[in-house]
Image (cartoon, grey):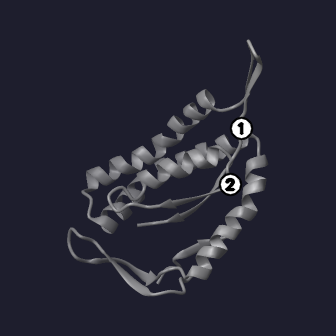
Amino acid sequence: MAKSVYIDGRWSDGKDDWFEKTNPANGETSWDGQASSADQVSEAVLAARKAQSDWARRPQHDRTTILETYAEEVQKRADQIAEAISKDMGKTAWEAKAEAGAMAAKVGISIKAQVERAGTAFSEAAFGSMHLTHRPHGVMAVFGPFNFPGHLPNGHIVPALLAGNTCVFKPS
């Protein structure tokens, strides 16, 4: 059995109820293990809070470079990701492959949006001046859906990380 909980850089077993994940396409068990306990969820949130200040202080270029590397790795592993998605939720192989591709593509889209919408701006106005700045908000919780288990969470996690936030992710 694989370790199912990743907190603060370490894999461990869940400490709550045992469950089985079944592929709806064929009824086979795709995964089984123990869910995270409430204490483990709290530990994950605390770890994300602890990491957030360092992550937020990283220069935007560094965060962007890390996420570009992530996109490259997703592309390299697209077949494995597609197979995992297909086995997990019964999605057809071609659709799961498209989802893996969308995961990699989301990084570039998010970087472009970050450049266009974030940063700082200053302008004079009739009443004085206007200052626009962006800052991270902190820890974000992301709950993975059944129908797009990779792409939809990725679509929240990538922009959050680019903006200097950290995330706690609960897969479907």
119 w.r.t. 40: above or below: above
Q: Which mark is residue 78?
A: none
Where is residue 163 shown, x and y percent of the image? 65, 43
Most distant residue in the top direction: 126
Residue closest to the eye, 111 or 84: 111
Most distant residue in the front direction: 127
Residue closest to the eye, 103 or 57: 57
Q: Looking at numbered disc 2 in the image, what kind of residue is underneath it?
A: Gly
Using the rendered view, name the quadrant where residue 91 is placed: bottom left
Q: Secondary structure at mark 2?
A: loop
Where is residue 70 shown, x and y percent of the image? 57, 49
Residue at the (51%, 59%) spot, across then down:
142
Using the rendered view, name the quadrant where residue 83 is placed: bottom left
- How far apart in space, not on screen, are marks 1 and 2 (Cα)? 19 Å
Residue at the (55%, 32%) spot, across then down:
113
Q: Which residue is mark 2?
A: 138
Disc 1 versus disc 2: nearer the observer: 2
The reply, left or right, for residue 153 in relation to residue 10 is: left
Q: Which residue is mark 1?
A: 61
Number of other residues with Cα within 10 Å of mark 2, as a class: few under 14, some 14 to 19, many 20 or more: many
Residue closest to the eye, 151 or 45: 45
Most distant residue in the left direction: 26
Where is residue 128 shown, x and y percent of the image? 79, 17
Tell me the quadrant of the picture where the C terminus can be found.
bottom left
Asked whether the residues under the numbered discs 1 and 2 touch, taking CB atoms below 8 Å apart as contact, a structural biologist would say: no
101 w.r.t. 109: above or below: below
Q: Secondary structure at mark 1?
A: helix
